[in-house]
Image: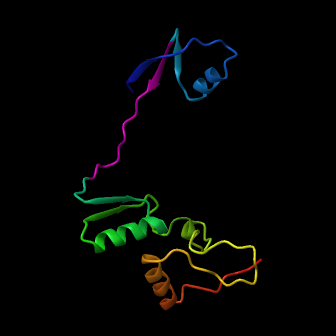
Amino acid sequence: MRARSIDAVPFVESNPALAELRRASAVIRSRRIELPISRDQRTALRFDCDVLVVGGGAAGVAAAVVAARRGARVVLAERYGFCGGGAVAGMSGTICGMYAATDDRGAPPRQVVHGFLNEFVAEMERRGGLTDPLLR
């Protein structure tokens, strides 16, 4: 594997950065550090789009849908292979920021975000994907 050299600040043996560099398999020679160069072996993809949305969480899905409805050519990139973000991956079952926070346990939920979210909630209700809020 090829290596590239970068200038390094002078080290002393007690320098914690030295230990970290050694753990990272850097070869220290004199005052130069040689780090291995690795190349990304994944296939490069090229998309022609007007809007690139990175992340398929609640906000990413909303941004992609709204932009597409307005006529933009949209690409939604999600690294985990499914949309939903933390609400799905962490099985939290909630979309943070949708309702106003309150310390009053008797207060009903007050939705503060609207627009696309109204459609999302209606579709989730239609599919049986919503439950009443849980209070602890």
Give the residue at x 62% y 23%.
17
- Using residue 133 as the reference point, say whether residue 64 is left or right of it: left
Quadrant housing residue 71: bottom left
- Using residue 42 as the reference point, say whether residue 11 is left or right of it: right
> Is residue 41 inside the magenta stretch?
yes
Secondary structure character of the magenta stretch overall: loop
Colour scheme of this structure image? Answer: rainbow
Q: Residue furthest top?
A: 30
Residue 84's x, y, as percent? 49, 69
Q: Which residues are magenta?
A: 32-45
The answer to whether 129 is drawn above or below residue 43 in the figure is below
Q: Residue furthest left?
A: 48
Residue 38's x, y, as percent? 40, 34
- 55 and 90: which one is in front? 55
Q: Quadrant of the N terminus?
A: top left
Residue 123's x, y, as percent? 45, 86
> Is residue 40 inside the magenta stretch?
yes
- 84 and 96: which one is in front? 96
